[in-house]
């Protein structure tokens, strides 16, 4: 059987993800996965558009017109917002610049791709998070008598305890958890930045037997993954998304407000941030705990919670929350101007 070699595009993709992004750019695994997802979606669209399999695509197929139609496809067919659209375009820009440096003979094709502008009009999406009573309902909906239930309970509880991103939790190894005082967990976040997060004593108490069961039976206990699926492999982000939706649906009978929310794994991280703010923790500490690169990222949680807004207003302008002091307007309409000013 005749075999065909890799195309220029295929070889470039291999160098891009194996050497360029992790080596020359020093990008974190989180960013590389995001770029990977963008390239995968683009390749699938190009394959359908050219009616050729992915392995037969070439650099000349990456045209500005095709990329523009791909971006429209993201918004119309996939329902992505402008922010996601621009994020995918940013990944394509980086990839196109890499191709141009590696294969300058294709610069005439790639330059228009690099010049595609980001779409304006992206709006901040309201932050969806769980209130404390909603989080309690979700945790109580988990059947902990099953081994998978105990894993799911600890997974969600640890996400809420630390405010970690879901991939940070899934990447945890047994060596990253300290169960002697002071209880803490070591997280590897964006930009390959390490941070330590304290653990509640209750969380540490639950983790001890779980770690003994999951890790001590492994050939290399310290390096064993903390959270695994039924096949003994690393649990995926999509698996966690499924679990969150499953338990939120089960908890909605006890906490009806959950039915009105679009809860996803990152909502647990948001719930941690809002709970810390309500407890009076300062922004700088919360920023360090969550691993934010900028303080402004943390401050958006102050705009998300209505209780915090209500508390701030009541402290500064308590009279604004009181009933109007205008009294009743006379039926004759006399003294209407003074009455309006008393409103």
Image (cartoon, rainbow, N blue to C red):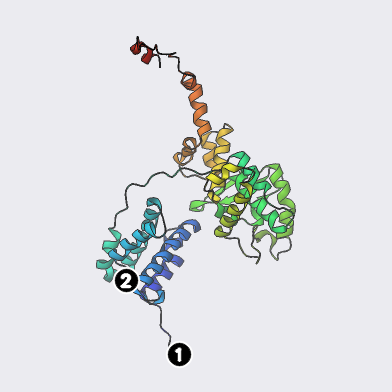
Coordinates of residue 10 in the picture (x, y in percent): 40, 73
Count of number-bearing discs: 2
Identify the residue at image location x=38%, y=44%.
Answer: 123
Q: Nearer the viewer, residue 298 or 51?
A: 51
Q: Which residue is mark 1?
A: 1
Q: Which residue is mark 2?
A: 61
Rendering quarter of residue 134: top right
Q: Is residue 25 above or below residue 99?
A: above
Across and down, in percent, residue 126 comes to 46, 42
Can you see residue 292? yes
The one nearer the camera, 175 or 37, is: 37
Q: The N terminus is located in which quarter? A: bottom left
Farthest bottom residue in view? 1
Quarter holding residue 241: bottom right
Residue furthest top as drawn: 335
> Height in image: 209 above or below 102?
above
Residue 181: tell me if it is visible: no
Q: Residue at x 59, y 33 (%)?
A: 279
């Amino acid at each position: 059987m005749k075999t065909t070699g890799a195309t220029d595009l295929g070889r470039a993709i291999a160098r891009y993800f194996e050497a360029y992004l992790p080596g020359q750019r020093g990008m974190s695994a989180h960013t590389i996965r995001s770029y990977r997802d963008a390239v995968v979606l683009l390749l699938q669209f190009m394959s359908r558009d050219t009616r050729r399999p992915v392995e037969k695509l070439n650099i000349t197929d990456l045209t500005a017109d095709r990329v523009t139609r791909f971006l429209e496809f993201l918004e119309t067919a996939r329902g992505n917002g402008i922010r996601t659209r621009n994020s995918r375009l940013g990944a394509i820009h980086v990839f196109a610049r890499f191709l141009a440096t590696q294969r300058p003979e294709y610069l005439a094709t790639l330059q228009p791709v690099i010049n595609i502008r980001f779409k304006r009009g992206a709006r901040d999406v309201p932050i969806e998070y769980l209130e404390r009573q909603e989080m309690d309902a979700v945790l109580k909906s988990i059947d902990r008598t099953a081994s998978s239930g105990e894993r799911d309970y600890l997974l969600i509880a640890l996400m809420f305890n630390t405010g970690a991103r879901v991939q940070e939790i899934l990447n945890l190894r047994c060596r990253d958890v300290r169960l002697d005082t002071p209880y803490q967990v070591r997280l590897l976040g964006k930009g390959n930045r390490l941070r330590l997060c304290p653990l509640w004593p209750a969380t540490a108490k639950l983790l001890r037997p779980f770690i003994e069961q999951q890790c001590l039976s492994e050939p290399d206990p310290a390096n064993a993954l903390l959270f695994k699926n039924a096949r003994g492999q690393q649990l995926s982000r999509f698996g966690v998304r499924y679990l969150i939706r499953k338990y939120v649906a089960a908890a909605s009978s006890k906490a009806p407000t959950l039915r009105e929310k679009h809860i996803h794994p990152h909502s647990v991280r948001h719930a941690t941030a809002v709970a810390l703010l309500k407890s009076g923790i300062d922004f700088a500490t919360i920023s360090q705990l969550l691993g934010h690169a900028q303080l402004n990222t943390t401050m958006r949680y102050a705009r998300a919670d209505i209780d915090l807004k209500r508390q701030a207003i009541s402290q500064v302008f308590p009279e604004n929350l009181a009933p109007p002091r205008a009294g009743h307007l006379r039926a004759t309409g006399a003294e209407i101007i003074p009455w309006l000013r008393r409103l």
